[in-house]
Image (cartoon, rainbow, N blue to C red):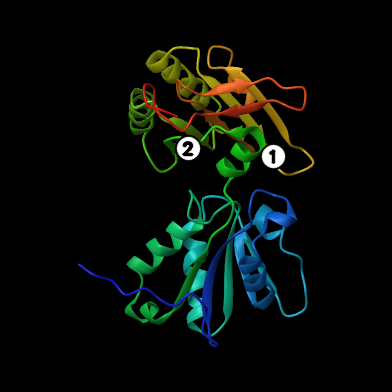
């Protein structure tokens, strides 16, 4: 099987760009994403993310609620097919538990005419990378990312993936840990992690990284509590090798580059 992918720049006519706004700070929005937003006639997204895009003449902002991803994607594609310059925004990176997949799903199930729509996915800095950078290098060796929301997958699958990730000794970035609608899920996840790997692993709770509300806290898995996280928090569970360096200039959390027994 082979595939031909589109060029990296949108065409002069209608196009659709799926943009990552980064973790929060304006300076972490990429120049490529900023250019697409400056050229857009329409911006679609979950309303807190659309509000991050300044209003200007010639721009129409289409905000919608959570769990409306496919509806949002179809509306954006329809406008791009009609010749508009459309941006769909996500926080972080649009390809990490965000809108890029939803747009691809809509295109995959949509009419043949949508095959002519010029679509670009523009990367952003996702929450786990911003959080890891603020803390040091907890993702410095092999790691994985797991979305704890059970809106689109059963809890049994989440639990299986958590256990296997601990068994493989990955560092684990946990997205969407604890919402008001499902506060019990994160407590169950912590219990599974403790059962699979004990309580000694280090856990980073990184809330609202790069914003004025930023909070960073490192505890052991045995000390981790559900109320330490909300939907603005990304949680990074270290591997068995992850270490915390206490320094007068500021602590650093990191995972060594080498596996146990290998030369560093």
Give the alpha-carbon distance from disc 2 to disc 1, as whole Å: 18 Å
Q: Residue at x 49, y 27 (%)?
A: 185
Which circle marks residue 149 in the picture? 2
Q: Is residue 213 above or below residue 50?
A: above
Give the quadrant of the N terminus.
Answer: bottom left
Numbered disc 1: secondary structure: loop
Asked if residue 2 can be seen in this view, the reply is yes
Q: Residue at x 34, y 76 (%)?
A: 111
Which residue is disc 1 drawn over?
208
Q: Position of residue 18 (x, y in %)?
A: 53, 65
Q: Residue at x 34, y 66 (%)?
A: 108
Label whose residue precedes the other's in the sequence (2 or 1): 2
Residue most toward the front?
A: 263
- Asked whether 25 or 97 is in front, the reply is 25
Q: Position of residue 242 (x, y in %)?
A: 51, 24
- Asked whether 66 or 214 is in front, the reply is 214
Q: Is residue 10 above or below residue 196?
A: below
Q: Are marks 2 and 1 in contact (CB under 8 Å)?
A: no
- Asked whether 251 or 203 is in front, the reply is 251
Q: Is residue 221 left or right of residue 104?
A: right
């Amino acid at each position: 099987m082979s595939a031909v992918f589109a060029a990296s720049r949108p065409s002069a006519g209608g196009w659709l760009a799926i943009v990552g706004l980064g973790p929060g700070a304006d300076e972490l929005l990429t120049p490529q994403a900023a250019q697409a937003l400056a050229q857009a006639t329409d911006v679609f997204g979950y309303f807190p993310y659309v509000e991050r895009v300044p209003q200007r003449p010639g721009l129409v902002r289409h905000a919608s609620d959570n769990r409306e991803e496919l509806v949002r994607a179809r509306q954006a594609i329809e406008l791009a097919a009609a010749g508009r310059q459309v941006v769909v925004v996500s926080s972080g990176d649009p390809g990490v538990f965000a809108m890029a997949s939803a747009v691809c799903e809509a295109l995959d199930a949509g009419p043949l005419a949508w095959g002519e729509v010029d679509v670009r996915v523009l990367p952003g800095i996702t929450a786990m990378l911003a959080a890891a950078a603020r803390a040091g290098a907890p993702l410095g060796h092999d790691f994985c990312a797991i979305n704890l929301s059970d809106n689109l997958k059963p809890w049994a699958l989440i639990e299986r993936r958590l256990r296997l990730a601990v068994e493989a000794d990955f560092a684990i970035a946990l997205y969407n840990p604890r919402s008001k609608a499902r506060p019990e899920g994160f407590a169950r996840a912590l219990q599974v992690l403790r059962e699979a790997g004990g309580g000694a692993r280090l856990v980073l709770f990184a809330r609202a990284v790069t914003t004025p509300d930023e909070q960073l806290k490192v505890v052991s898995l045995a000390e981790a509590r559900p109320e330490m996280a909300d939907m603005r928090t990304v949680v990074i569970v270290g591997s068995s090798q992850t270490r915390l360096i206490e320094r007068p200039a500021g602590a650093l959390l990191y995972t060594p580059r080498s596996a146990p027994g290998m030369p560093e």
